[in-house]
Image (cartoon, rainbow, N blue to C red):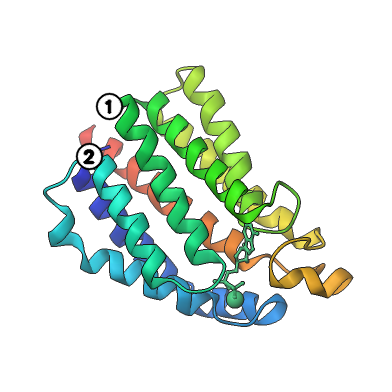
Amino acid sequence: MSTAFILIAAKNIRDTILDHESELESLDREIGDGDHYINMKRGVSTIVEMEADLAGYPPDAVLNKIGMKLLSTIGGASGPLLASFFMGMAKVLKEKGDESTHTYASAFAAGVDVIRLRGKADLGEKTMLDVLIPVSRQFTQLAADNMPVPQICTVLITTAEQGMQSTRDLIATKGRAAGLGERAIGHIDPGAKSCQLMIAAVCNLLLEAKESLG
Ligand code: ADP
Ligand code: MG
């Protein structure tokens, strides 16, 4: 995954977040404080605006800079968590020093682990981790099985969708929705929705890139 790919992916992520404005806003209005869309929009727009400053750096440095920028631009609970994801990923990419699918799977898993530690949350607590943990586990497994990237992408799109949908029936034990008890049931977690959208955007881009290469 080159720096050029990361910069195109950032634009696709911004577009998908902007396309889902009303959905993201209403999910956080239902079980949060309504600011999730604004937080995400600020973050993704800022990253796209950094394009010229990022272009000359290797992927690990780009992801680290993205993390640092998100830390200072996105507010709310989601900002520092997503920021730490990118910094966690960057650290592993830098240490491993290659761009294989295995390395990206390890880097993704490391990013998710940092969110877990920072947010003191785990699977089943009705947060973004209900998307990120299953996707990370699946990615690690499929990379170990040497599955080709397009097939991995197709599976991960479905895994992310299922994880996002799984939050609907959960009671929240972390984040703002934790105070709602059973009233949170029936609503999808906004952070889980935005993570699912971002994962789908990157996977679809990889699928398109393969198609155009023939
Ligand atoms: P805030 O909750 O401060 O208003 P946002 O609305 O931007 O911030 O983000 C809310 C999302 O953050 C939630 O939907 C959830 O997915 C995620 N989140 C909140 N707390 C945690 C946590 N401790 N661990 C993981 N994710 C969390
Ligand atoms: Mg909120």
Quadrant where the N terminus sits is top left
User: Is residue 159 or residue 112 the one in the foreground?
Assistant: 112
The relative height of residue 173 versus residue 35 in the rendered view (above or below) is: above
Q: Is mark 2 within 8 Å of ligand 1?
A: no
Helix, strand or loop at label 2? It is loop
User: Is residue 19 or residue 1 the one in the foreground?
Assistant: 1
- Figure quarter occupied by ligand 1: bottom right
Tell me the kind of residue under disc 2. Ser
- Percent coordinates x, y for residue 103 in the rendering: 39, 27
* Residue depicted at x 41% and y 64%: 71
- Cβ atoms under marks 1 and 2 closer than 8 Å: no
* Residue depicted at x 51% and y 17%: 145
Left or right of residue 110, residue 130 in this image:
right
* Residue depicted at x 29% and y 38%: 211
Q: Pointer 1: what residue? A: 97
Left or right of residue 171, residue 187 in this image:
left
Left or right of residue 84, residue 63 in this image:
left
Residue 136 in sight from this viewpoint: yes
Q: Is mark 1 within 8 Å of ligand 1?
A: no
Graded by Cα atoms within 10 Å as few (under 14), some (14 to 19) or many (20 or more), the crowding at tag 2 reads: few
User: Is residue 64 or residue 24 the one in the foreground?
Assistant: 64
- Percent coordinates x, y for residue 101 in the rendering: 38, 27
Q: Pointer 2: what residue? A: 2
